[in-house]
Amino acid sequence: MSEIQRIVEHLDRILPQFIQDEPLPGLAVGVVYDHRMIYAKGFGVSDIQSGEAVTEHTLFHMASVSKTLVATGMMQLAEEGVIDLDGVVSDYLPYFEMADDRSRNLTIRQLLSHTSGLPDEDDFAWDRPEYDEGSLERYVRSMKDCKLQREPGQAFAYSNIGYEILGDVIAKVTGLSFELYMKQKLLEPASMLNSTFLKEEAAETDYPLAVPHVLGLQGGYGAEPSSIFPYHRAHAPSSTLYANAVDMCYYALAHLSGSSTPRGDGKLLLEANSYSEMWRRAASTDYGDILEDMGLGWFMGLYRGRRVLSHMGRDTGFRSGFLLLPDEGMGVVFMMNADYVGGKILGSAILNVLLGEDVPYVQQSLAHHLSRLTITSGVDAAFREYEEIQQSCPERFLVIEGEFNAGAYTLMRRGWLQEGIRLLELSVQIFPGSSNLHDSLGEMYLLAGERALALMHYEKSVELDPEHAEGIRMVNELLQSN
């Protein structure tokens, strides 16, 4: 059996099982191996209501993976001398201003590397979409009342806002709309002929656009179509690439070939020295693992000793991931039409297969598994299942603290407060040192009218984290009201 055949058969075994194990409607995966596309397939459905199957051509909203294209576009313009990576933003956008004198010194490089000190966006207005070309400039002009959160260049802090500004820079220095520049200079040269940054264009292609799904509880525990689609033209640079598994493999190939070629031949996205600049460490993150460092638009790190360049994406109803191992000529893309299933373990499992490991399964989320049991069979059944798993197959499940916390809040917000509390009670047994989980329990017990239990858990959260200001405030408030 050839190595490629082994990889394909392995993925064909573990990916269908993954989508059965998780409450996930649809998934598409693409793989590049030894500078060749060897895998592009879809699983599940693009819409649980229509039941239409996901294929390798189904388009997905790629969310923040979009930022890698913005970074590539900026590097193209730097190659041409149109922009200077260390030039200040206001040189290219004279109308850009903030209620902060430090913003006058913001550079293109700082925006690309998330070291600008800009805050992150807290309302993408997905429920109030704008479709006209002027949306992006209006958004940038709206920054006039905002302030920086820290000194520019001081430290990494992820900011979608910075990428909207970069998209507007691209539009103004080229005289094209942001989306048209991306189409002409990146998508078409990379053979991504079915990809676009415009939702209207995505809807007009020969291939379906996946429907976003959120976690639903009324019919059990699983996907339900989102009432909104995450689109707003002002957020095109940070978020609105629509692509499929095949096109994303072409995108991977374009970067893999360009980064290993000494000189551009006119057909590559970038010259090799631009990759050295783009993929050079600009800042450290606090994310660790393959996301340990930030380059210009790309996260950087090591996976089992191999260099990895990557970006993940998440918006309402969608998750995505794009990973390159440039020294091995490998690339992986995955896209889901749901926002509540984590992708990190899936990406790791696929990489392990490519690197020769025998992967029996993609680990299942213990939080989702127990949350589903809580809804369908009751809290006691979830407790019994957890105890059985601990005895029989703990390695089969992925245990992430944040997923338990998020699951409990989902239950609470959907009207299942007591179930959320019980899930958190189980969670603090699994993570006895978590201040955050005890804080969440305090909040939920307070909502349930159990003030004594709320106080106990707030006190425990402060005991575990003496600098937990909100916990200290709640302890004092509860003590004073007794």
Image: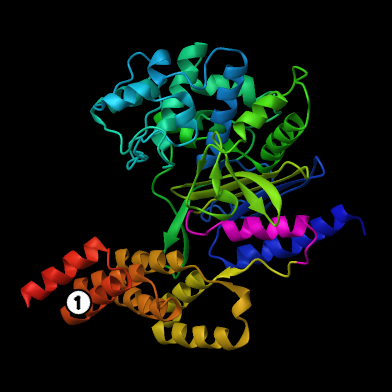
Vertical side of 49 occupied by 261: above or below:
above
- Asked which quadrant contains residue 268, the reply is top right
Report the side of 65 relative to 190 (left or right).
left
Dot 1, how many residues are within 10 Å of its Cα: few (below 14), some (14-19), or many (20+)? Answer: many
Report the side of 418 relative to 38 (left or right).
left
View extreme (left): residue: 481
- Asked which quadrant contains residue 377, the reply is bottom left
Give the magenta-colored segment's residue range: 339-358
Locate the C terminus by quadrant.
bottom left
Magenta stretch encompasses residue 342? yes
Q: Position of residue 158 (x, y in %)?
A: 43, 42
Magenta stretch encompasses residue 383? no
Identify the residue at horizontal 77%, vertical 55% (top origin): 354
Q: Nearer the viewer, residue 77 or 109?
A: 109
| Residue under numbered circle 1 | 455
Identify the residue at horizontal 56%, vertical 37% (top origin): 295
Q: How many marks?
A: 1
Identify the residue at horizontal 57%, vertical 17% (top origin): 77
Q: Nearer the viewer, residue 268 or 6?
A: 268
